Image (cartoon, rainbow, N blue to C red):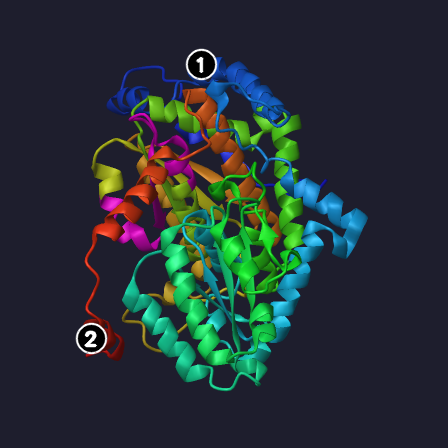
Amino acid sequence: MQLPDENIEYHFQRLLVPLHDSWTPLAELQSQHLLPPERLDRLKDEAIKIRGQVVAERELQNPPPEKRPLQPGFIDLPQKLLDGYKRKQDASELGKILRLAQRLRDTVDRVVILGVGGSHLAPKAIFDALCHSHHNEMPSKLRMGKPRIYFEGNSSDSDGLQELFELLENTCVDPDIVEERWGVVVISKSGGTLETAAAYRAVRGEAVKFYGPDKETLRKVIVPITGPKNSRLRDLCRADGIPDEDILTVPEDVGGRFSAFTGVGLLPAAVMGLDVRAMLLGAATMTRRFIEEPFDRNPVLQFAAVNHLMTERGKTTRVTAAWSKKLEAVGWWYDQLLSESLGKNGRGPTPLTTVATRDLHGRGQQHQEGPRDKLINNLVVRQIKHPPVMIGMSDRNEDDLNQFSRKGLPDVMEAALKETNDTYAGVARPTADITLPMISEHTIGQLLQLLMLATVVEGRLCGTNPYGQPGVEGYKRNLVSNLKATPNLPKGEVRDQAKGV
């Protein structure tokens, strides 16, 4: 078990209605917009009961109709991967992930990651949180041989993909030079998501042009990640000669938005040179805390219960306020997780991600004086990674900052967090803090698992099946139907567009 100061915690005391000796306007607002402690106390037993149900669902082989779809495989997956690697090393699933990641790192200097939804947002959240903010601009020596990373296949933006092709065409000229080679990680659990499939066809065509007829090289620079069965992507890759041992599989009982600790998140993380075992250990530790700890020490149950009750009290807009730019993509990932899991049957909170202090100069006005429909969960990082940027002394003091010469940007951030929380508390605007001791593989593993587990518990609390996404499946079907009905572009127009005419 890790030391206590490595634990992520959820601090929600500011959300609770405080005791008052007499009526005041603030006390009235607090009674209306904060959470009565007795209401949370009444929910604790129910939350613990729900935990038992969620834990028991892992063993259901033939779930009743009201439980379907049921995909709880993500809960135990981190520990299973660690245990399998300990027993079988390279022959395990994690060993296979590490092998393929090392092959890409040895073979190419650029990796294009294709995916949409969880297949895009999980690796993007991991990349932004744990890699250098200017990773792709760093020379190879400073990147320590880690490939540059590009994300595509998450929309149908033709210009965006063409501009990536322009970059590759102008920087990758000789396929015999490792520094000029590029590879592809294509992710689609269903194997048929149109945006990713169309992007992969185009990217695969560019790869064939670049590497020529050498199919052996193509097999080395393309890694598919897909579902275990009925996958067009798997069929296509097999037809291209990619062997099954080089295709990673998302387990059937793990939904796409819950797949951060499958190859979907782990392969890109390993390609980036990150410690995926530390990430899995963090996730497994959070699962253990969820299963074993009482409510008062259980951040999963606390987050699920408090956010559920605040939604019931009309706080239907759930803001994730990242107090580090590196966690903004984690917010985007949680936006999708929450939306697809709980946004059903006319219900479910609406997620929103902001970055502080950046967005305090925009959305902050509305959060303080706009509609009272918001709960703000701050993502707070206690320890910075690099030496602090200091304000310092200057011979020109027109900006009047010499008085703060011994302070740095971390001091500014800390003062802003306190001022923001105090200001919101002063007008009964509810805020709580998810506190990370630092940003590391271990804490990111904890954070992603916390949010996935809490989303499942919250779904069960409000009577919504957190698995499945019937609305999205309808979109996918209608997209294909509408595309069939759309007239083809004239060939000349296609050529002109490709030339920029």
Q: Residues within 10 Å of mark 1 (few under 14, many from 20)?
A: few
Horizontally, is 463 left or right of 84 in the view?
left
| Residue corresponding to mark 2 | 492
- Residue at 43% from the left image edge and 62% from the top image edge: 200
Is any part of residue 145 visible from this angle?
no
Expressed as whole percent of the image width and height from the top left, the position of residue 325 reads 42, 56
Amino acid type, residue under disc 2 in the picture: Gly
Is 141 colored magenta in this rendering? no
In the displayed structure, 428 sits above or below 473; it is above
Q: Nearer the viewer, mark 2 or mark 1?
A: 2
What is the span of residues highlighted in magenta in the rendered image?
A: 337-365
Horizontally, is 427 left or right of 445 in the view?
left
Horizontally, is 312 left or right of 250 in the view?
left
Mark 2 / mark 1, whichever is N-terminal? 1
| Residue corresponding to mark 1 | 38
- Residue at 20% from the left image edge and 75% from the top image edge: 492
Q: Nearer the viewer, residue 361 or 420?
A: 361
